[in-house]
Structures are given as C-alpha cells and as structure tokens.
Amino acid sequence: MILEARNIFKSYGSIKVLKNVTIECHRGKIYGLIGANGAGKTTLFRILLGLIKQDSGSIEINSQGIKPIGGIVEKPALYGYLSAFGNLKVFAQIQGLKLTKELFYQSMEQVGLSPTRKDVIRNYSLGMKQRLGLAIALLNNPECIVLDEPFSGLDPMGIFALHELIKKLSSENHITVIISSHIVSELTDLCDTLYVLNDGEIIKSGSTAQLIKENVTTFKISGKNLEMSEVLKDVSAVFLNKSALVSPKSMSISEVLHKLTKEGIEITACIPQTDLKALFGREPV
Amino acid sequence: MISLIRSEIYKISKQSKTLYALAAILIIEGFVIMSAYYQGAGIIDLLLDNLKDSFEFRGNLLNGNLIIYLILNSLWFHIPLILMIIISGFLTSEYKDKTLETVMLQPVSKLYFILSKYIVSIVFTLLIVLILAVTTFFISYWIFGYGDLVVYLDGLNFFKSDDAFYRLIYAFLSGSITMVFFSVVSLTLAVILKDATKTWIVSAIFLICSNLLLKIDFRNDVINELFFSKLTDSWQYFFYYEIPYSTIYFKNFMLLGYSILVMVIGVLIFKRRDIQG
C-alpha cells in the first residue's frame, strides 16, 4: 500500500467537514473520489497533501522518495509572469532539483506540451496550465499524485487528453493517482476504485465497475423506430428524440436488448445512466 | 535554503513590480532635484535672510550635499512606504495567486520558505537604499556640485563639504537599518493579513503612527528609550555637530532586535497556519 488515511476528522468551527474518513491506495492504481460540491473532497486532498492538518486520524505514505506525494488542488496555481521553463525552474529549484535542458524537455514532453514555447504562461489555456501543473507535480518522481477536479473547465478534447495522460502515468510509470470529481462520467472510465464522499463521510467504496453496476437503474437506448417496439412499451420506456430511457424491473437490460434485436429494431447505442441520488445518497439502490 | 533564496531572487527579478519600485524611487529623487533646481535658491535665501545680516556666507549653499540631505529625508515616509508595499507583495501575491499552495506541495520546509522570504526582503531593502544613495550622490554632485551643508536640526547646523559627505554616507547606512525594520514589519503583516490591500493599509497606518509616536514624549524614560518608534530616527543624529555615536549604536542595535522579534513572530505564525486556498 502506498497511501493510507485512517479515521480522518476535520472541523472548521462547528462545521464538521470530514467525519471518520478512511481511504487506502495501492501502487500503480487509479482511485476516484466522487461527491457533490461541498462533500469534503478538496479538504481531504489538502490533508493528504499536507497543506492543512487534520484534527485527528493518521496518514501514512509508504515512499522513500524525496517527494512522496505530488498534486494539484483545484486550479493549477503557477507564476503567470514566468514562462513554462521559468515555472519549472522555480519549482525544481526549491526542491533542490537542477532543471537541465534534458529534464525540461522530458517534463514537457511527458505531459504533452511543446518545450519550444517561450512566452509567459498567463497566455496558456486552462488545459495547458493543467498539464504544466502536472509536470510540476511530477518533478522528483512522486509515487503518488493527487488531482483535485482536474477536468474542471476543460473541453472534451482536453478531458480525453488528460484521461490518456493519467492512464499512461499509472500503467507506464506505476504512479498511484487519486482524482476527485463531482461528475461520475469523468471517473468511471478511468478509475480502478471509487470512494463516494457525502457530507464528509465515505458512504460507499469499491471497484468502479461494481459501484456503477449497483447504481445504474436506467439505460438510454438509441436506435431506429424505437417507438414501434412492444418490448419498450412493456417496460414502460420513456421515449425521447430517437432514444428511450428504460428502467427494466422484470428483466435484465441484456434481455431487453435481445428482445429488441428479435423485433428487428436497429440499436445504435445503450448507455447506462448512473442514478446520482442513489450513488451520492445513503439509501441503498 | 540557498536554493529557496535563489528562486526568490529569480522571481523578484522577473516581476514588473520590482521595476516599479525602482522607478518610484527614481521619480521621488527626480522631483526633489527638479524642485531644488527651480526653487531651491529662493528657499535658501528666505531661510538665511536674517542670518545674512550677522554672518558672511561663502560659496553656494544650494549644492549637492544639501540635495542629498533633502533626498535622505525621504527615509521618513516615502521610501519605507514604497518598500512596505513592494515587500508585502512578495507574499500577498503568492496568497492571491495560490502559488503558495503549489510551493507547499513540493518537498519544501515552511520554515525555510518563509525565512528565505525575509532574507530576500532584507537584501532587496538594502539594495534599494544603496541604489537610492548611489544615484543621489552621483546626480546631486553632478548637477549642483560640492559645497558646505546647512541643516536645520534644533537650530541651523553647518558642516564643511568633506565632513558633510561622510555624515551623509553614515546617515544612509544607519537609515538602511530603519528601512529593514519597516520591511520586516510589512512582511510579517503580510503573513498575518494575507490580503494585499489590507496589508498596504495597515502598513501605511503603522508607518504614520510610528512617525507620530516618535515625536510624542511618553513621560517615561524606559518607553522613551526602548519603544520601537523612538528608535527609527538614528540616521538624523549624524547632523549634530557632535555625533552621539553611543545613542546611534544603541538605537540601531535595539531596532535590529525588534526586527528579529517581528521576524520570529511572522515565522511562528506562518509555520503554525494551514495553507488554505
């Protein structure tokens, strides 16, 4: 295990932000921390990164490296008046690392940024700043990185590129990645394990596939002539434009799809719809 | 620690506000010189009108030494105010831009980080005073030439040109300790308040109050001797006929002690506080 946070409590005055939070992370895996806004995700990350102290509980990071853990909290906070080289130079220098030309090129290429760009980073897009922030977080080769809402404000291409980068860091560099988000779809394709944080408490945890399966009750089926289907009428589907929302109770979704095929309906997509109330709430599905 | 100091110097050298600080100081200097150039002779005549009946003045009293003394007097308010604004900004801008968080996400000691800020602030202050002094001496002697210095300090004091030159140099050296004190206070205020505008306002109030309290008699010898505001005028003592070296040493030593105390308070507060976004 690379990181273990056990029984973490944190309050601000009378407001209890974290209540008995425990998470365990293994080497080279990707973990997702999901929860609504204000659930306590950023506070937990700040504690994991040592920015703030917990009221009680323990954090153990099993790494012998100079920098056991790196990360970005909320937006990447960088020196806007410096270039990418200047930023990397400052952040390398303060941790006793000499930024050689080779290291600069390697750091920039690792996150998919052009090392030839010389202008100050206040001209960069948010996605580029995220990447540069990640390059800074990766200086000195931490074994674990924590990314707080890294997809926030990124366009779909930026989200895809960051997904690929995180997967690469996990699979090729065996870095443990912990990501938070309040958007389920951002984490489902990426994370091995999910923790669900609600009102400062971990209310659910487990493999992403299992948790999603447990919290999916509705599927969005797209195809041609759906409104002609008797099967969809039988399962009380809600018809939308060229799609239908199905919440089958008497049969499984695979049975519904099988029967639709038998009816000659051409299905183009079947997308599971996570029940957010069930996932974020305390009630069992 | 050395690498932290080097990175702080690198950041300062790349920030436009450093240039603004230098420009502000040179503008103040320019204004004093320009006013002296156009109006100085008239003011000197007005000041010495009565004395001219009893004494004979040789040479030009509106000379480089007088101009340097006038610019030296910007150490009362203008220079410390500029320094306090710039130096508190070294930290408040890191709070505002949240770069402090990114710094603290690296394997960096909070103690060494804030100490490096204080050290660089002190070096920056000394450098600004040095630049002010060098440019003042150079420009004043170049435009107005040499001559005897007349200073009003509990009466009119006259110093020969060579004597005035050394007194002015020592006054700048002594004044730099006062400037360091105000710089350290502003950085500690930045640690406490975090916000730039609040820090500027409180720094300005601190400076004004400090100057006002200097003139107040507390009717208590201990307070009159040891209270910090009573220690910030050591550089003026070089313009008495007999320089009271022991008083100057005492004031500067005490002011350095206050600077260290204020710095320790700032370091302790910074170390204990969470880094909050």
Image (cartoon, grey):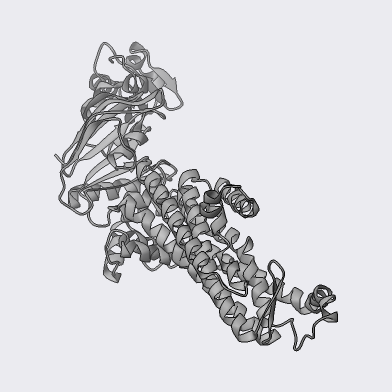
Q: How many marks?
A: 0
Along the viewing direction, whichever of B215 and A6 lies nearer the viewer: B215
Along the viewing direction, whichever of B95 and A2 lies nearer the viewer: B95
Q: Residue at x 38, y 48 (%)?
A: B101
Give coordinates of residue B159: x percent, y percent: 65, 80
Q: Quadrant of residue A255?
A: top left
Q: Is residue A170 above or below residue B57?
A: above
Q: Is residue B48 left or right of residue A167?
A: right
Give coordinates of residue B98: x percent, y percent: 44, 48
Give coordinates of residue A132: x percent, y percent: 37, 56
Q: Quadrant of the N terminus of chain A?
A: top left
Q: Can I make out residue A11 in this image?
A: yes
Q: Can I make out residue A108 in this image?
A: no
Q: Quadrant of the C terminus of chain A?
A: top left
Q: Residue at x 43, y 57 (%)?
A: B257
Q: Is residue A134 left or right of residue B80?
A: left
Q: Is residue A130 above or below residue B176?
A: above
Along the viewing direction, whichever of A3 and A154 lies nearer the viewer: A3
Q: Is residue B154 above or below residue A226?
A: below
Q: Residue at x 27, y 62 (%)?
A: A96
Along the viewing direction, whichever of A282 and B257 lies nearer the viewer: B257
Give coordinates of residue A135: x percent, y percent: 32, 56
Q: Is residue A277 left or right of residue B188?
A: left
Q: Residue at x 35, y 55 (%)?
A: B113
